[in-house]
Amino acid sequence: MSVSMIAAVGKNNEIGRKNELVFRLRGDMKFFKETTMGRTVVMGRKTFESLPKALPGRRNVVITRNAGYKALGAEVCKSVSEALKLCENDDVFVIGGGAIYSEFLEYADRIYLTEINAECGDADAFFPKFDKSLWNRRVLSQQCEDGVEYSHVLYTKKC
């Protein structure tokens, strides 16, 4: 199993506000789809509920403490450890939210971050801070869309 995390972050690691993404860039949405297609995506309940439906072409796994929770098109589990066991033979992409990213950070082999040169002052969800000296950083692409500069960056854990 490999565990990757994927997120778009602003200058202050902001990712969301009121259960919605703070940055919606077409090029980043395309990157997300291409990178996660055919893989397993793991997310928290609130992230799942922010989507119009389960993400097509991917195995969807939702983590929630609500024992009776039903998620159309997704499998439900109650903890990170249960999700890891359920997906032990998969390439896993953790897609949010903030608390789920924090819980998976120790298991991640790779982090795909879209580093956006912008800020959202009223964000209420953040990607966890991590010690970047423990990771190799490689810029995959640099783009500008609607006047917003951003880079797709891959962090791989050093051995």
Image (tube, grey):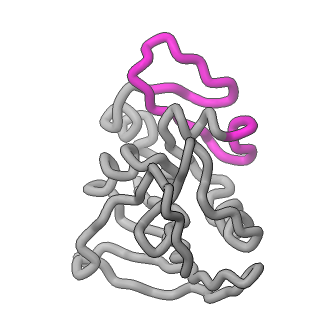
Task: Give coordinates of residue 143: x percent, y percent.
Answer: 67, 86
Q: Is residue 93 visible?
A: yes
Quadrant of the rendered structure where residue 81 is?
top left
Instruction: Please name whichever residue, 67 or 89, is drawn nearer the observer in this view of the structure.
Output: 67
For the record, the magenta segment spans: 51-77
Q: Can you say which quadrant of the picture contains the C terminus?
A: bottom left
Residue at 34% across, 83% down: 136
Residue at 45% across, 51% down: 125
Instruction: Please name whichever residue, 34 or 89, is drawn nearer the observer in this view of the structure.
Output: 34
Q: Residue furthest top?
A: 68
Q: Magenta stretch containing residue 59, yes or no? A: yes
Using residue 82 as the reference point, say whether residue 25 is left or right of it.
right
Q: Is residue 108 positioned above or below 81 on the image?
A: below
Using residue 14 as the reference point, say whether residue 142 is left or right of it.
right
Q: Is residue 81 positioned above or below 92 on the image?
A: above
Please identify the dominant SS of the magenta region.
loop
Residue at 42% across, 66% down: 13
Residue at 73% across, 47% down: 57
Q: Is residue 91 visible?
A: no
Task: Give coordinates of residue 101: x percent, y percent.
Answer: 39, 51
